[in-house]
Image: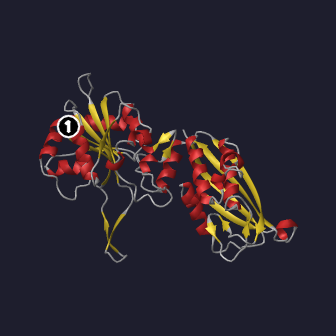
């Protein structure tokens, strides 16, 4: 169906979630504000709709407590309207629908964390909604489905012949939008097509693509980056050495080792974290740890490895780089890392705001050779791979 100059769609991007299911490692950032490509997840989502000339306006529904600053945090252009959301997705969707222009022929509602939606998918949903009143992007279920008995056993196999997995955008024609807003909202409805269904309306299925994934956890983010393709790879190496200082606590990989002699240094002397910092800065072309956290600067006295890692990752992300993986080696006779590797990887990953699976940790000795073999100090080496986002 052709789109004339007097017919346009409103795009409502629902991005009011707090990202509670994303998992550990993201700090206080909602997942829609996490880096993806040369911007944020949400910025890429919005760009897909703004690339469609027949989308006349773009509205983003933001967490209400962040509405005043959300556009800037997400890196959105000034023409995008920001409206505060509600306590759950259903409320946020309604607020977005209410904010849409009354001149819009179709309103498209899309999840802010589906950044890989293609413009042709948006168009096909809009055309189907304009023709039939309501439409939803979806993909046929391909895997065999099993119904559980609630106790970990298979109750029966579900026939998947007519099953579809819902995606977004979901489109409503203007008259259907008015019906939805004027009518009672059915309890338990989780998407816009469900509201149309509750009114007894038919909803057209428009086949989408598995690549239009919803970012729920770190594995989805990794898949999104893979589907986007790398925008260039950069390698960095880091080394660090510290003398043993028995009067200090020992911190390695942002984890405390009680009962072990510590290391001398202006900060907490976390030799493993410092090597990782140098590797990250090197790969991003940002100098070294001494440039950013000089030992003569009182601000860094006693600074933890976790704090310095977090600040370093902020510098890396500001350069539009993404950590692909890091390989770290602690060199020393003791302490042994057995039983502590996962805790160290988790602690460093949390400081960096990345999944812990991106960090690999090894321990080596020098077979008694040199100052390390004499237990006079510890050393660490790190190699990282960064991608510059596409």
Q: Is residue 347 above or below residue 387?
A: below
Binning the other alpha carbons within 10 Å of mark 1 as few (below 14), some (14 to 19) or many (20 upward) gives many
In the image, 260 versus 369, the foreground residue is 260
In the image, 243 versus 156, the foreground residue is 243
> Would you name the residue on which mark 1 appears?
173
Spot occupied by residue 351 in the image (x, y as percentages of width and height): 56, 58
Spot occupied by residue 67 in the image (x, y as percentages of width and height): 34, 44
Q: Is residue 366 visible?
A: no
Q: Is residue 264 visible?
A: yes
Spot occupied by residue 144 in the image (x, y as percentages of width and height): 37, 62
| Quadrant in which the N terminus appears | top left
Q: Is residue 371 above or below residue 174?
A: below
Residue at 12% x, 48% y is: 183
Residue at 19% x, 32% y is: 102
> Farthest residue in the front direction?
298
Q: SS class of the residue under badge 1?
A: strand
Q: Quadrant of residue 239?
A: bottom right
Q: Is residue 55 above or below residue 296?
A: above
Q: Is residue 340 left or right of residue 61?
A: right
């Amino acid at each position: 169906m052709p789109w004339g100059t007097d017919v346009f769609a409103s795009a409502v991007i629902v991005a009011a979630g707090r990202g509670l299911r994303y998992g550990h490692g993201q700090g206080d950032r909602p997942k829609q504000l996490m880096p993806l490509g040369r911007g944020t997840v949400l910025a890429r989502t919005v760009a897909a709709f703004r690339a469609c000339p027949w989308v006349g306006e773009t509205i983003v529904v933001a967490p209400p407590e962040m509405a005043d600053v959300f556009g800037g945090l997400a890196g959105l252009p000034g023409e995008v309207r920001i409206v505060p959301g509600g306590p759950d997705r259903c409320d946020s969707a309604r607020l977005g629908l209410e904010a849409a222009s009354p001149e819009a022929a179709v309103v498209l509602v899309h999840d802010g964390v589906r950044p890989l939606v293609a413009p042709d998918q948006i168009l096909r949903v809009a055309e189907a909604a304009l023709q039939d009143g309501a439409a939803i992007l979806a993909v046929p279920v391909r895997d065999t489905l099993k119904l559980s008995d609630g106790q970990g056993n298979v109750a029966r196999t579900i026939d998947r012949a007519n099953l579809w997995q819902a995606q977004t955008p979901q489109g409503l024609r203007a008259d259907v939008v008015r019906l939805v807003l004027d009518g009672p909202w059915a309890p338990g409805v989780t998407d816009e097509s469900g509201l149309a269904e509750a009114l007894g309306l038919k909803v057209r299925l428009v086949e989408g693509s598995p690549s239009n994934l919803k970012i729920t956890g770190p594995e989805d983010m990794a898949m999104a980056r893979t589907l986007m393709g790398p925008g260039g790879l950069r390698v960095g190496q880091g080394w660090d050495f510290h003398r043993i200082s028995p009067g200090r606590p020992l911190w390695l990989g942002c984890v405390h080792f009680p009962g072990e002699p510590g290391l001398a240094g202006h900060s907490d002397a976390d030799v493993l974290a410092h090597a990782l910092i140098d590797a990250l800065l090197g790969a991003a072309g940002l100098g070294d740890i001494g440039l950013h956290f000089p030992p003569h600067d009182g601000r860094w006295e006693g600074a933890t490895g976790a704090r310095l890692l977090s600040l370093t990752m902020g510098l890396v992300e500001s350069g539009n780089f993404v950590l692909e993986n890091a390989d770290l080696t602690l060199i020393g006779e003791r302490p042994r890392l057995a039983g502590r590797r996962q805790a160290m990887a988790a602690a460093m990953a949390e400081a960096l705001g990345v999944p812990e699976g991106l960090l690999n940790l090894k321990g080596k000795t020098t077979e008694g050779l040199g100052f390390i073999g004499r237990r006079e100090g510890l050393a660490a080496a790190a190699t990282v791979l960064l991608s510059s986002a596409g």
